[in-house]
């Protein structure tokens, strides 16, 4: 897509936005400073027996919102914004106040509703595990192309290059296959042979991203050893709404996205997107390289009765990567995957019964060519992964307890010619889990456990226990201890691959045991005033039975033989400190992370883990000629990190340094007429270019235009 096409799409969005109908307007402001509260959520509840929000709109960057004509009659408004206490008032009160909603600051954000920590909606004040949330406001502000590039800007999280391409996220020094990636609570595709790549996960149609910093295997099972990343998509709303977005930026970056949603008791939402960048994530090569991703996501919700809700989701992803591999050849990765799942929730026998069914298919194909496209029909190495899972869960509230119990069955299958023994492998698994959260005075105590039985690698149990309390006004304490595990992958169990040119072969090990970890985290948060909050948290994580490839001898043909073994231990520990508040009309947030990550087997630091990192962000809304200008300036600092390799004596050692990196980013969003939003940004404003990094680092600009609720009422 050229800049001319981007301009044409921009003009189309402007014309479409101009057709919007005028509606009654309101504003959301901060009660302490009087500053507008951008992008607050306004929910409408008609008078009647229903207690859950049934419709929603959103304020723009100037704190302004339109009251849809369908919001008529008596009812209640609920206004939410991160960092503020929710506000509830009747329609009569809203009209009497001139549709001006004034929110009180809440530095501890006690009423933020999160879903990942418990597999269901919970208030932040009830959650003991450390969890971070990237909101829709932050996603717009950063305009990141993927989940990986969004999360890599958070202190305590680092990007990790894949082999030969792709990128993953390390949480507190633990990454790769040891971080579980979910979309709406369901596993992301492409993980059975450790082919995880967060750079392929688009942010189109995404409402927020929640990150659990620590193991949560008691709820989610395998791979949640280092943490959990859950991408939460937007809910469909009543009526009819269309949104569109286009963006262009440095490095050959182009993006486009369109969404439509609506309905009544049967609601729907569908989002399609396309993006390209002249670089393959995880590689520092740019000559002739590119990555293109096509995404389609859809959901339907039936809310026809008070006792039964049904949801069905289908998503499709297609990706092509191209990068130079030497001798005039280019490598091509072609990936595509489809995920379909459905869920029914029935209120019966004093609680909620939830039934889920998931089916997933993912294909990966690597080819080489001297041309601009791979050779047609060269698909002998097509890798196909399939995953099926069914879940039954019962949730009940009994007195001060909120109890969930469930059972889950799954089957995994993979076909990989010339790489897996007998070209295919499969396993079956049964999980039984339970969790409870109960209030004891000012404290909420939580406990849970999951027992896993797998017919290929064996059995394991993962418990967790936590407590959170508010002993005094403005104080919150929490602590949690939990066990995580990662089951050995098909690659580690059944790999059978020979590289004759390299003179070696890799063989799987069917006797591998799961990797396990014990994590302890404790933190305290203090809000000395309505506009300031401070927090500090310490953690330690001991990982045992790490699976690593080792040399075991030569085969009869003289090739070196490598095979994975459980023989390594590691430890990560550290401190995270945060502070947020207001300086005049400026919102300020600062974070610092100290990380100590070491291999205990050879007493070496873990590869590319920076000991120090931090972030400082300033932002405010500035009155402008039009409705408002929201500006943000962020400084990210990452200290130097060791690069490990094999030295001249054949031993693992520190062979180089990944240099420290200071990136200053700036972003602005400008509200235009008719619900159009202009976004401008620059990453790495100072054009810092540290050495030793595994990706291209340079200054890059971007510009985008978003049209929200094109034909809104």
Image: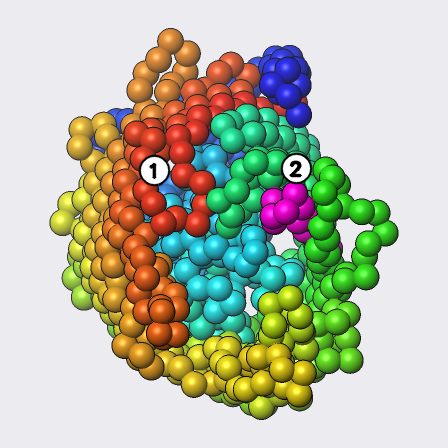
**Which residue appears at 36% of the width and 69% of the height?**
648
Residue 629 screen position, x and y as percent: 37, 20
Q: Which residue is mark 1?
A: 689
Q: Is residue 513 left or right of residue 508?
A: left
The part of the image, by quadrant, that contains residue 164 is: bottom right
Quadrant that contains the N terminus:
top right
Q: How many residues crowd around disc 1 within 10 Å: few (fewer than 14), some, or many (20 or more)?
A: some
**Which residue appears at 23% of the width and 30% of the height?**
586
**Which residue appears at 45% of the width and 20% of the height?**
671
Which marked residue is nearer to the observer: mark 1 or mark 2? Answer: 1
226 is higher (above) or lower (below) than 247: below
Residue 300 screen position, x and y as percent: 71, 49
Q: How many residues crowd around disc 2 within 10 Å: few (fewer than 14), some, or many (20 or more)?
A: many
- Residue 283 visible in this rendered orientation of the protein: yes
588 is higher (above) or lower (below) than 611: above
Q: Is residue 572 left or right of residue 67?
A: left
In the picture, the disc for residue 116 is none
Residue 364 screen position, x and y as percent: 71, 58
Residue 456 screen position, x and y as percent: 65, 87
Whether the magenta-drawn stretch holds residue 345 is answered as: no
User: Which mark is first along the chain, 2 or 1?
Assistant: 2
Q: Secondary structure at mark 1?
A: loop
Q: Is residue 331 left or right of residue 461?
A: right
Between 165 and 67, the one nearer to me in the picture? 165
Q: Which residue is mark 2?
A: 273
Looking at the rendering, the stretch of residues picked out in magenta corresponds to 323-340
Q: CA distance from mark 1 to mark 2?
A: 31 Å
In this view, which residue lies farthest toward the top?
A: 625
The part of the image, by quadrant, that contains residue 489 is: bottom right
- Residue 214 visible in this rendered orientation of the protein: no
């Amino acid at each position: 897509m050229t800049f001319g096409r981007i301009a044409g799409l921009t003009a189309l969005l402007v014309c479409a936005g101009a057709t919007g109908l005028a509606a009654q307007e309101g504003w959301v402001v901060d009660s302490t400073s009087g500053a507008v509260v951008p992008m607050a959520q306004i929910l409408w509840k008609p008078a009647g027996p229903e207690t859950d929000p049934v419709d929603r709109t959103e304020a723009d960057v100037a704190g302004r919102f339109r009251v849809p004509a369908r919001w008529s009659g008596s009812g209640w408004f609920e206004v939410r914004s991160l960092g503020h206490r929710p506000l509830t008032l009747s329609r009569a009160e809203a009209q009497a106040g001139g549709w001006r909603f004034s929110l009180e600051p809440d530095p501890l954000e006690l009423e933020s509703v999160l879903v990942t920590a418990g597999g269901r909606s919970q208030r932040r004040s009830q959650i003991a595990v450390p969890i971070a949330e990237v909101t829709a406001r932050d996603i717009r502000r950063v305009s990141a192309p993927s989940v990986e590039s969004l999360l890599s800007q958070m202190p305590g999280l680092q990007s990790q290059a894949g082999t030969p391409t792709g990128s993953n996220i390390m949480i507190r020094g633990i990454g790769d296959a040891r971080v579980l990636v979910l979309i709406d609570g369901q596993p992301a595709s492409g993980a059975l042979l450790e082919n995880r790549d967060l750079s392929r996960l688009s942010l189109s149609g995404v409402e927020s991203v929640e990150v659990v910093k620590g193991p949560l295997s008691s709820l989610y099972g395998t791979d949640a050893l280092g943490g959990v990343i859950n991408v939460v998509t937007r809910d469909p709303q009543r009526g009819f709404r269309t949104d569109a977005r286009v963006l262009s930026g440095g490095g050959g970056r182009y993006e486009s996205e369109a969404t439509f949603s609506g309905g009544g008791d049967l609601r729907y939402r569908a989002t399609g997107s396309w993006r390209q960048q002249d670089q393959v994530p995880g590689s520092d090569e740019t000559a002739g390289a590119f990555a293109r991703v096509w995404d389609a996501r859809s959901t339907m919700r039936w809310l026809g009765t008070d006792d039964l809700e049904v949801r069905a989701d289908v998503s499709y992803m297609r990706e092509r990567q191209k990068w130079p591999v030497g001798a005039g050849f280019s490598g091509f990765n072609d990936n595509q995957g489809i995920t379909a799942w459905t869920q029914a929730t029935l209120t019966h026998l004093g609680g909620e019964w939830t039934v889920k069914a998931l089916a997933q298919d993912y294909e990966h194909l690597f080819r080489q060519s001297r041309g601009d496209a791979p050779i047609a029909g060269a698909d002998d190495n097509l890798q196909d992964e399939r995953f099926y899972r069914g879940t039954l869960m019962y949730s009940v509230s009994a007195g001060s307890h909120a109890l969930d119990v469930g059972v889950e069955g799954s089957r995994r299958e993979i076909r990989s010619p010339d790489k897996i023994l007998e070209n295919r492998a499969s396993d079956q698994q049964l999980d039984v889990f339970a969790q409870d959260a109960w209030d004891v005075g000012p404290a909420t105590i939580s406990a849970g456990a999951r027992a896993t039985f797998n017919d290929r690698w064996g059995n394991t149990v993962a418990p967790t226990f936590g407590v959170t309390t508010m002993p005094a006004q403005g104080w919150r304490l929490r602590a949690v201890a939990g066990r995580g595990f990662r089951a050995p992958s098909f690659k580690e169990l059944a790999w059978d691959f020979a590289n004759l040119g390299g003179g070696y072969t890799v063989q799987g090990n069917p006797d591998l045991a799961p990797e396990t970890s014990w994590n302890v985290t404790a933190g305290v948060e203090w809000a000395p005033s309505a506009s300031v909050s401070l927090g500090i948290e310490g953690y330690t994580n001991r990982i045992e039975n790490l699976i690593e490839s080792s040399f075991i001898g030569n085969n009869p043909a003289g090739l070196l033989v490598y095979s994975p073994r459980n023989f390594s231990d590691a430890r990560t520990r550290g401190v995270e400190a945060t502070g947020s508040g207001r300086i005049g009309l400026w919102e300020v947030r600062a974070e610092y992370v100290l990380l100590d990550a070491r291999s205990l087997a050879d007493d070496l630091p873990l590869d590319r883990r920076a000991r120090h990192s931090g972030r400082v962000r300033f932002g405010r809304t500035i009155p402008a000629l039009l409705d408002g200008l929201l500006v943000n300036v962020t400084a990210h600092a990452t200290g130097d990190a060791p690069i490990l390799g094999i030295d001249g004596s054949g031993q693992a050692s520190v062979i180089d340094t990944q240099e420290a990196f200071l990136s200053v980013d700036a972003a602005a969003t400008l509200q235009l007429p008719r619900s159009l939003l202009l976004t401008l940004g620059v990453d790495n404003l100072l054009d810092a270019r540290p050495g030793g990094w595994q990706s291209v680092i340079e200054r890059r600009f971007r510009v985008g235009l978003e049209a929200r609720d094109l034909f809104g009422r």
